[in-house]
Image (tube, helix red, strand yellow):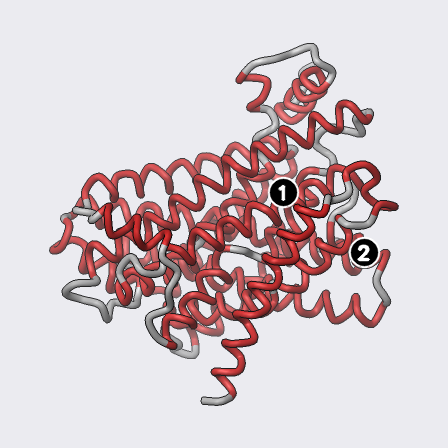
Amino acid sequence: MQTSLSDRTRLSMAETLAGNRRGLRPALAFFGPAVIASVAYMDPGNYATNIQAGAGYGYALLWVVLMANGIAMLFQALSARLGIVTGKNLAELCRDHFPRPLVGVMWAVSEVAAMATDLAEFLGGAIGLALLFGLPLMQGMIATAVITYAILLLGGRGFRPMELVIATFVGIIGLSYLAEMLIAPVDWGAAGMGLVSPALPDAAALTIAVGIIGATVMPHAIYLHSGLTQDRAGSPDPVAKRRLLRYSNREVVIALAVAGMINMAMVIMAATAFHQGNPEVAEIETAYHMLTPLLGAAAAGAFLVSLIASGISSSVVGTMAGQMIMQGFLRRRIPVWLRRLVTMAPAFVVVAMGVNPTEALVLSQVVLSIALPVPMVALVIFTARPELMGEHVTGPLVRGLAILGAGVVLSLNAVLLYGFFAG
């Protein structure tokens, strides 16, 4: 009897956890959940906020990207741990342990976040396809919808084909930005200083900083990761579970480190190309058209290829997350085509209303940053409960770092809201 790719992957993981297989190749079987989650950290919303950060402030906001990536690593690792240890995803645990009125509010906020997420991802893919083929934006959106739905159908073949497809898109994005770094005349000394010198030059930089955090630490990715890990290796014994958690942590560090470097490369590219002569560049389309005369056709082409790969892959992941959120909070599972239709509807409305796509991307990231404390606080609470986590409950250091990370996000959101309402 022929076994599926997912079955073979699960068998390889089981043998490795039992101590029967060692080395790099068996370890690769554990790569998948964090790779899928990492797509959320390099979606088109990141392009919009990172272009604005680099063009407007040069390398000065690179430290925000580094900080956001560190927070993302911690919370994705905690999300994976929660799924592996409890066998449930974060939304299911919220439904089971929180009061019903609170669960309703959390679900509503999470659905808004899922729609804001898909707005950014869907628009990014559509912009890329429209620029590549010279299409109207609405036709680019229709093409993006068809492509993402076709990829989502792979979910019926098990978890591994989807993981490999998403990993391919991540590779395309990474290679594209590696090419950008080789082409652009980067001031590496200034970039290094931007990484280690926290500063916000003005009030507008605060809005972009919060947008970077909203585009980097994603609510739907925190929900999704806990669900992607829970069933991949069955129900291992305590020793095997500890090994599984170690493999999971390594995958999170590697996958999120790659995502972080891609985000930094986005800011560096924008700073190198636009900051000195064109600091007002804020739109993805403008950035693409200006890259050819500034850095050459190869740089513009790499930018466009990475944008399309980002938009399509992150749109797929956003739909997967939205389905898991609804299923977890409401015990309702809807067909993937209907979920795809619900989450992409706001993007069509935005374009039909004539709203500037890049402005919509940036505002969607601010919305995500406002929604982010909901899963962050829930994750901190659950991973600190011994009755849920047993021996894998978070220790004082990890718990303290998680509280600090959530506090940073909450504080930045409060400052942003105060500034907004105070005019």
- Residue topped by disc 1: 77
Q: Secondary structure beneath disc 2? A: loop
Mark 1 or 2, which is nearer the eye? 1
> Image quarter for residue 154?
top right
Q: Is residue 84 left or right of residue 199?
A: right
Residue kind at label 1, given as amino acid type? Ala
Q: Is residue 405 left or right of residue 227?
A: left
Asked if residue 123 can be seen in this view, the reply is: yes
Q: Is residue 164 left or right of residue 97?
A: left
Residue 166 rendering spot, x and y as whole percentages: 50, 39
- Residue topped by disc 2: 331
Identify the residue at the far bottom of this view. 422
Residue 21 rendering spot, x and y as whole percentages: 64, 11
Q: Is residue 121 above or below residue 204?
A: above
Residue 258 rendering spot, x and y as whole percentages: 43, 39
User: What distance separates the C-alpha of mark 1 from that of mark 2?
Assistant: 25 Å
Please report whichever mark, 1 or 2, sits nearer to the chain's N-terminal start.
1
Image point (72%, 66%), residue name: 106
Tell me if mark 1 has few (under 14), some (14-19) or many (20+) residues whose alpha carbon lies within 10 angstroms of its own. many
Q: Are marks 1 and 2 in contact (CB under 8 Å)?
A: no
Residue kind at label 2, given as amino acid type? Arg
Q: Is residue 139 above or below residue 177?
A: below
